Amino acid sequence: MQSCPFSVTASRTMSLKQSEPLPQISSSQKDKFYLDYLRGLLNDAVNGILSPQRTISWSKELQLLTDALYFGITTLQSLQTLGEEYTGIIQVDPTKRNLPSLFRRVCMVAGRILAPYMIDKFFAHIERKIAKNEELSNTNLQNMLHRVRAILNVINRFHLSLFYLKGLYYAISKRIAGIKYVRFVKPNSNANLHLYAFRLLGILSLMQSTVALSTNLYSLLYEVKNFRVPQTQVTIRNDDVPSMRCGLCLEKRKSTTTTPCGHLFCWHCIHSWVQAKPECPYCREAIKAQSLICLMNYA
């Protein structure tokens, strides 16, 4: 049996109890801060070796590598992450007596970093297939995929609402792995001071998620019902027009986005670029992610 990394003397003055929602949220935010910092360092290193276009095209893989290294040297080694150490919470198995087994920790890390990556790659692959097929690109199949993506996001918010209500499993990956959090609490402490506020937030979030889920399911069923493959038509493609290309990926722009200085890029390309280097790729004017404007219905 694996023992908890705290001394017996400390356990006599403090009791081990289930962690409240606030420390778990603070821990996740702290981990995100360090992960963003590491991603920035890795992006700068790769950008110095390869071209900016290659760095942007590999942004998802670089993020996956950073997350794998971070959780590989902490969670998979039965160590606390920097966020968990900062808030003083400890991972335990469902019995709340032992540290999680290696299998549970691997399941949690894979569910946290690998599952979102695979889902994103799957949808991106399907969207590329649809874009290359002239018949399917003229259908509402793209709208159906967007609805499915929206439903997945709502399910994640729905799970977060349950966390606010119960205080268990901040992430879906932790629920799948059965990993909970505990921490040492002093006697007569106000550990449950914020529970009612979180429960109220959970109720409101649950109502909003239920409405959003119902709306997206209804829209998806409507899109499926009205799905038709149109007859083949001769269309004039403007993919090869230089003014329609993105200066970063060198392909036809998708979701054309303008910078404050007036240059046009794909939304994903310029957003990923600004996250790594907050300046325009053309004129080097300093820009922020919130200043980017996506041009709707732009030809």
Image (spheres, helix red, strand yellow):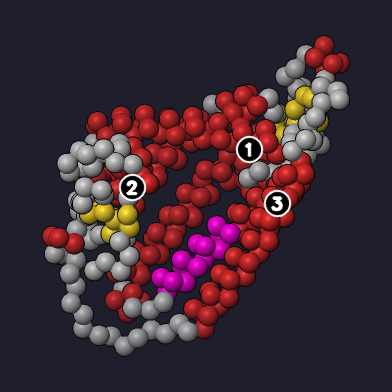
Mark 1 closeness class: few <14, some 14–19, many ≥20 residues within 10 Å: some
Residue 194 horizontal side relative to residue 30, left or right: right
- Residue designated by label 1: 25
- Identified by mark 2, the residue type is Ser
- Residue designated by label 3: 202
- Is label 2 in a helix, a strand or a loop? helix
Q: Which residue is depicted at the point 17% across and 43% down?
A: 282
Residue sitting nearer the eye, 236 or 77: 236
Residue 80 in sight here:
no
Compared to residue 101, the image places residue 200 above or below, namely: below
- Is label 3 in a helix, a strand or a loop? helix
The answer to which quarter of the image holds residue 240 is: bottom left
Magenta run includes residue 146: yes
The answer to which quarter of the image holds residue 171 is: top right
Q: Are marks 3 and 1 in contact (CB under 8 Å)?
A: no
> Which numbered circle lies on residue 291?
2
> Which numbered circle lies on residue 7?
none
- Identified by mark 1, the residue type is Ile
Q: Which residue is depicted at the point 26% across and 49% down?
A: 259
Circle nearer the viewer, 2 or 3: 2
Q: Quadrant of the N terminus?
A: top right
Mark 2 closeness class: few <14, some 14–19, many ≥20 residues within 10 Å: few
Q: Quadrant of the C terminus?
A: bottom left
Magenta run includes residue 254: no
Query: How far, Cα to Cα, is label 2 from label 1?
Result: 28 Å
- Identified by mark 3, the residue type is Gly
Q: Earlier in the sequence, mark 2 or mark 3?
A: 3
Tell me the magenta residue range: 141-154
Circle nearer the viewer, 2 or 1: 2
